[in-house]
Amino acid sequence: MKYAGDLKEYLPQSPCIISNNCLGGFIYQDTGYSYLSPTIGLYFFFPDYIEFLSDLENNLKLKIDFVTESKYSVGNERLKSAKHKYPVGLLGGKFEIHFLHYHSEEEAEKKWNRRVERINLANLIVIGTELDLCTKEDIEKFDNLSFKNKFFFTKLEHKLKSTIIVPEFYSNPKIGDPYRNGHVLYKYFVQQLNSQN
């Protein structure tokens, strides 16, 4: 994908990318790096994601159980309209995870646990995208997290240290999804990383 080569130049050699949606997985695919994060092929609703991040190291140790429906009405709408039935996990009984690109609970749990074991927090990159019930307050909470390398994609100016503004989506109701618009997000990600060097 366009800009992926430039992005690889600025990332650590074995990045641990934690993301609220599929963007992290696409970065791994497009740069050729091994999956060193469990947040691949899935998404969180942002209220759960920001709480998950608030104690990331301990929350990653929690057990996943599976549920038949989402606590969010929009989550249930997506489940009903999905092309295939995908599992919904509840990490530690608290954090809802939609395993969008998985076909069974067994697959989702096995891959989550295996990738948790690969995590190297020394190479941690935390990404947020203004999607899935994300509010201005959530963005501010994200910006206040203690992670050194954190980046938040938004279409509006929030004047926060971690935000990366993507003006292409200014007139859209939301940031474009990573699958169709990853190259747009990569472009601004590269610019941000370049400015920090």
Image: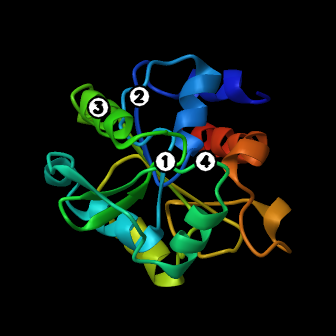
111 relative to 33 in the view: left or right: left
Q: Which residue is mark 2?
A: 15
Q: Which residue is mark 1?
A: 42
Residue at image location 66% in from the left, 38% down from the top: 190
> Disc 4 or disc 1, which is closer to the eye?
4
In the drawing, what numbered circle is on residue 84?
A: 4
Q: Earlier in the sequence, mark 2 or mark 1?
A: 2
Residue 28 in which image quadrant: top right
- Dot 3 amino acid type: Lys
Closer to us: 165 or 52: 52
Q: Which residue is mark 3?
A: 110
> Disc 3 or disc 2, which is closer to the eye?
3
Residues at marks 3 and 2, CA–CA distance in whole angstroms: 21 Å
> Disc 2 or disc 1, which is closer to the eye?
1
Q: Earlier in the sequence, mark 3 or mark 1?
A: 1
Q: Are marks 3 and 2 in contact (CB under 8 Å)?
A: no
- Dot 2 amino acid type: Pro
Residue at image location 36% in from the left, 38% down from the top: 38
